[in-house]
Amino acid sequence: EAGVAQSPRYKIIEKRQSVAFWCNPISGHATLYWYQQILGQGPKLLIQFQNNGVVDDSQLPKDRFSAERLKGVDSTLKIQPAKLEDSAVYLCASSLLGAVYGYTFGSGTRLTVV
Amino acid sequence: KQEVTQIPAALSVPEGENLVLNCSFTDSAIYNLQWFRQDPGKGLTSLLLIQSSQREQTSGRLNASLDKSSGRSTLYIAASQPGDSATYLCAPLYGNNRLAFGKGNQVVVIP
């Protein structure tokens, strides 16, 4: 089966600019996750969708971050305006309901804010 | 709070040695546990998935054990190779499909 697709792979922007990341999960996976991973840290959950509804966005900085999952498939994560501390790898993952077979992660987007 | 600790944080071993990576988690009410591999700046690749009812899983040179009651898992990598150099993350799964992560074990295998 095809994996979780993410784009772009790399992005460099200036602070205060905006950026968007795209994710296409594995077909049939109802649950989609966005994680932020700062260098030297473990991934931190930003938002979790089940189909096209938000299950958990408690750690999403809503003043600058937004995410949507239209039609319960693809998802977009946006940052506007970006800050230096947003430099990180942004990971998308998907799973079946209940995650019985675990998570599958995409290859990530490495964001550098200068 | 669901915390994950991985020891050692970093290690270097000569090629051919066996690797033992330890993971402990504070909340034992897990559904399953995944071990992932991560290369610098890249995504996470799933290595092994252990269900909460299982004691271990094996794939090639990799073996992961799980002691749910004591909140521990260990990943063994036999006969290490330079290509095994990476960060290894263990992630127990909790309710609401939530994975918990530690900071990982950073491994360097010296040729």
Image (tube, coloured by chain):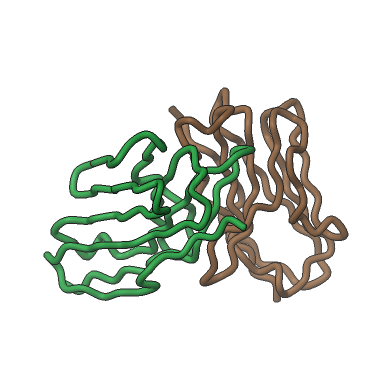
Residue B53 occupies quadrant = top left
Q: Quadrant of residue A26?
A: top right
Chain seen in brown = A
Question: Residue A56 location, x and y as percent?
Answer: 74, 44
> In the rendered view of the protein, which quadrant contains the N terminus of chain A?
top left
- Picture colour for chain B: green
Q: Residue at x 66, y 69 (%)?
A: A87
Where residue A9 appears, as percent x and y from the top left, is 56, 54
Q: Relative to residue A108, is residue B37 drawn left or right?
A: left
| A49 in relation to B82, above or below | above
Where is B88 relative to A23, above or below?
below
Lateral position of residue A105 relative to residue B96, left or right: left
The foreground one among A85 and B11 is B11
Quadrant where the C terminus of chain A lies?
bottom right
Residue B107, position as x, y percentages in the image: 32, 68
Q: Residue furthest right?
A: A63
Residue visible at 52% across and 45% down in the picture? A106
Q: In the displayed orientation, state which residue is furthest to the front.
A: B69
Q: Is residue B4 above or below residue A2?
A: below
Identity of the residue drawn at 78% across and 40% down:
A68
